[in-house]
Image (tube, coloured by chain):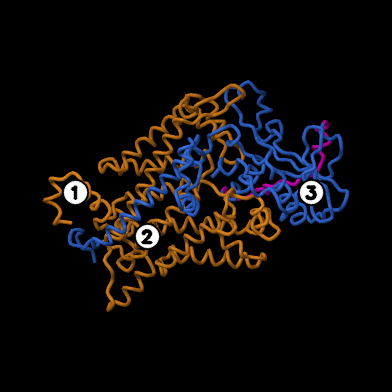
Amino acid sequence: MASHEPLAADNPLLRFGAAWNRFWFTPHDAFSLAVLRIVVGLILLYWLATWTPDLTAFFGPRGMVSTEVLDELGFGSVPPSRLSYLSLANSATELYVLHAVGLLVAAAFTLGVFTRFTSIAALVVAMAYIHRAEFLTSQSDAVMVILLFYLCLGPCGRCLSFDRWRAERKQAAGVEQDVTWTATPSLRLIQIHLTLYYIIMVVAQLTATYIAGPQTISFPWIDGTAVWWLAARPDSRWIDLTGLLGSSLVLINALTHLLMLFEVALIGGLWCRSTRRLVLWGTIPFWLLLAVLSGLGMFAALMCAAGIAFVEPSRLRRLFAPLGSRSGTR
Amino acid sequence: MNTRPDEIPGPSSATRTTINVLLMVHFVFIAVAVTVNFQPVSSFRLRLQNIPFAPLYAKLLSQDILYNGPLANFAITDGQFDRDYRCRVLLDWRDGMENDPAAVAQLEQIDLLPEGVWPNVRRQRYLQLAKYTGLSEGDSIESLLPQAISDYLLMEVHNIPPTMGERHRFQCNERLLQDLPNLRSIDPQERDPMADRWLSTRYEADLVGTGQQWAPNKVAGREEVTQVQPIGGTGGGESSPRAPQGDR
């Protein structure tokens, strides 16, 4: 890349090319990917575990969303049941065996056991549940799949993993560098995709309408009532805040506008070195509030987790320092 | 173990080119997924779906979601998509009960959403199924899920065989949201959001035992429209209800 520098100074196209290459290929510490692997892996494990009590109710041969029902519902040209290995189960026992395998894969991925293989396998597991019954899934699943996909592409098992521990025991074979260009595309993709989600949120919220009555159309994020509509769904929410919110329309308006303003701040703030830390800390109360209001806890957790891609690896290393060098924290 | 980034070799030119091409393809496919799934969609944007492999790529990675729906608005999109739905079976339904709320209240009910289901992510799945059932109303496949849900709740959970001649009632209701200004004018005792007065019936069917299964006969006003559509049979596969776009 260095040999291009003099030419690049004259030619805008080459300058762009050099900047592009710096952005995508400047070596980066794989520790960030490792932390992301653990957090996303734990969320995946939790998510898979929550399927356990309802597995046969939904996916069993006599379940509410059996493969027959699913194919009958019809979604485009590819029957969704063919996109999921769970459809291969012909009995409840087979279903639970496949489920147990999925849980094992997720656990291995989280611990960083044969991560090259288990990262891809974890993605396949997550996709199997989502494609088995798309209409049971929620927005969090889309975020989880894309994070798993990006983690597959990078060396997410290089630190804080069983693989690392094994490599250090075989000192003769040498331990791979933590700082590597192969980590950069993964991290950049996560950063870009997260920003894309926030941009979409702002654009969608600015244009969102709500049919409040036969002749009433409201713009809830602009007229400041969105927070009320989030809290007013009694089946979905975590806790009932309508008593508190109902006492003050000003509070509802202020919270709605604050949430939107913060989303706008996130888009630019995440990419600006001086504001990054501030907005990253801000995402925690932001998503916590949204989780409490809407009941979308997993979505909130995943969006927070994706923010790890923006955290300086040195800070993450300090955080995990007590685990010692065995885990690749130094 | 760590070396300064500028001392670490980057990828070869060929590797860089390959990765750049793959990145471009990925971004094009994601851009198509976002463009096509941000409603309303122009016919030009809809044609982008014809780009080979783009829809499949988006589907596999679950990026074929409604971008100005639940993802971005946390489900504040449109009156019908925002609401929570509830499905239940009322046992031993008899003619004329529609006009007798007191008699309906006496009936044994089996709810799709199990009592005290936890954590919330499990609860959301049942709510999604109920919502999808409700939003399928009016579609050619509207009776499919009511039948599947009824068969499961009655035969699998409560061990009630589909005896010929027996009749129950399947209901899918949407829970109306409490509008803040109006709520203040309501008697506090009637503000319970879970009360039946906040429910609107979206789909209702008599469940008739056929010996094999519980067949739903949709109740349309006072008329009954026979909608027996055996699971695994033909038909209904072409169309898709509105719900997947509303929630995915």
Which chain is home to disc 2? A
Q: Secondary structure at mark 2?
A: helix
Magenta span of residues: B99-120
With respect to residue A329, does B185 lie above or below?
above
Residues beneath discs 3 and 1 located on the same chain: no
Residue B134 lies, in percent from the top left, at: 66, 40
Q: Label 1 is placed on what type of residue?
A: Leu
Name the tint of chain B in the rendering: blue
Which chain does the residue under circle 1 lie in?
A
**Three-letter amino acid code at the position of disc 3:** Ala
Asked whether, in this view, residue A111 is left or right of residue A183, the answer is: right
Q: Colour of chain A?
A: orange
How far, Cα to Cα, is label 1 from label 2?
27 Å
Which residue is disc 1 drawn over?
A: A14
**Does the CB distance between marks 1 and 2 fall below 8 Å?**
no
- Number of the label disc, if any, that sits on residue A153: 2
Give the vertical position of A328 relative to A17 (above or below).
Answer: below
Q: Position of residue A196 (x, y in %)?
A: 39, 43
Q: Nearer the viewer, residue A98 or A159?
A: A98
The mark lying in front, picked from 1 and 2, is 1
Give the alpha-carbon distance from disc 3 to disc 1, as whole Å.
68 Å
Task: Using the rendered view, name the quadrant where residue B131 is placed.
Answer: top right
Q: Residues within 10 Å of mark 2 (few under 14, many from 20)?
A: some
Above or below, comparing residue A249 to residue A135 in the picture: above
Labelled disc at residue B215: 3
Local packing at callout 3 (Cα closer than 10 Å; few below 14, some 14-19, many 20+) is: many
Tell me, yes or no, whether the highlighted magenta stretch contains residue A244: no
Q: CA distance from mark 2 to mark 3?
A: 49 Å
